[in-house]
Amino acid sequence: MLWLALALPLVAHARQAPAPEEAQSMYLTQDFEPSDASHAMYALRTPPVRDEALGAWHVLLAFPETPGKIAMETYTTDLKLSQAKFVHLRKWYYENGQVFKTARLDAQGKELAGGELFYESGQLKQRETPLPNGRLVESFHENGQLMSRIVYRGQKIADGVYVSYGANGKVSSRAHLKDGQMHGLSEVFHTNGQLYQRVRFVHDKREGEFVDYAPDGSLRARTVFVHGQPEGWSFESHDNGQVSQKVLYHHGEVLSMQKWAPDGKPVIAWQRDVQGREQGDVTEWYENGVRASVIPFVDGQRHGLMQIWYSDGSLQQIVPYEHDQKQGVERRWDKSGKQTMAQAWQDGQPVPLNP
């Protein structure tokens, strides 16, 4: 950082003719280490100015590719920025000159409550206000409408009811917090004001019925939770109202699942026991609704006749299994129905096919 020290006399000797801007620039990475222009995050084009009242250097860092546009303004305890403390103020800018973010710091570099964030348009995005025993954080939409208002006690959100709003000013969500956790009824709303989701929390865990509604008010999904885990049958729907899946839960584990396409055609179906082992048929379908395959399971092992079909419904392959091993004659056919392969198996090993 020798350039920084050498640049300081430029402040005192204002009569000295300045060198071209590029010659006066020092390029820095995001960690404020020296860099070339192509990899730089900042450019230091004017020498820091000592503020004796604050006991710090006032530093202006520009965008490397846009001369005259300030990227960050700050105060620092040392001219070697990569090792210095930033104190009193840090302010970031968009390339259009609008303030992006402000942060207030004490003389030791600790960030204080009271920072702000802005949209590129200049509209306030977020504001933090110190409180006697905490801080208030307010967020805004770009049109100026309030988005949310949250009170913090230390690092935790204070107890109470919290409401957020959409850009149209309507309530978008409502939640209850206790001891820094979700506790009580939580609701989310569509932009038209209709209820979107509703669920109750007990100490940050879902408890009871979780429901999901379409903008027209029709029920779109339902799951029951017990101590934070889904239990029993649940369902979800496509946007057109067709059921998309049904799931059977037991203590949070999936025992059965069925899925359907938006046109109502089946996609897949399978089931397990409480030990997580597949039981019964795993069946899949083509997009046209034709069955694609059936794989039978017993206690997590393939057991029975596996069958695969072409999308026109004609049989493509059969494979007999016993306790997860091929047992019997495996056969394959082409789309014309001509058999193309026959192989006998015993205990999972190929054996000659009896005539």
Image (cartoon, helix red, strand yellow):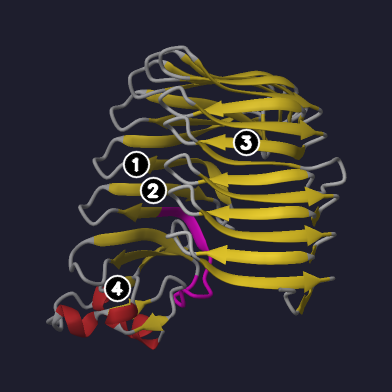
Percent across and percent down for residue 350 are 75, 78
Q: Is residue 244 above or below residue 121?
A: above
Percent across and percent down for residue 331 are 62, 65
Residue farthest toward the front in the current orientation of the protein: 355
Q: Are marks 1 and 2 in contact (CB under 8 Å)?
A: yes
Q: CA distance from mark 2 to mark 3?
A: 49 Å
Left or right of residue 267: residue 200:
right
Give amino acid for label 2: Lys
Q: Residue at x 12, y 82 (%)?
A: 17
Q: Is residue 231 above or below residue 285?
A: above
Q: Residue at x 20, y 85 (%)?
A: 23
Q: Is residue 145 magenta?
A: no
Q: Are marks 3 and 4 in contact (CB under 8 Å)?
A: no
Q: Which residue is mark 2?
A: 101
For marks 2 and 3 on the same chain, the one whose residue lies earlier in the sequence:
2
Label for residue 43? 4
Q: Which residue is mark 3?
A: 258
For marks 4 and 1 on the same chain, the one whose residue lies earlier in the sequence:
4
Q: Are marks 2 and 4 in contact (CB under 8 Å)?
A: no
Q: CA distance from mark 4 to mark 1?
A: 23 Å
Give the mark toward the camera: 2 or 3: 3
Main SS, magenta region, reads loop
Magenta stretch: give its range: 78-90
Q: Which residue is mark 1?
A: 118
Give amino acid for label 3: Gln
Residue 129 in view of the camera: yes
For marks 1 and 2 on the same chain, the one whose residue lies earlier in the sequence:
2
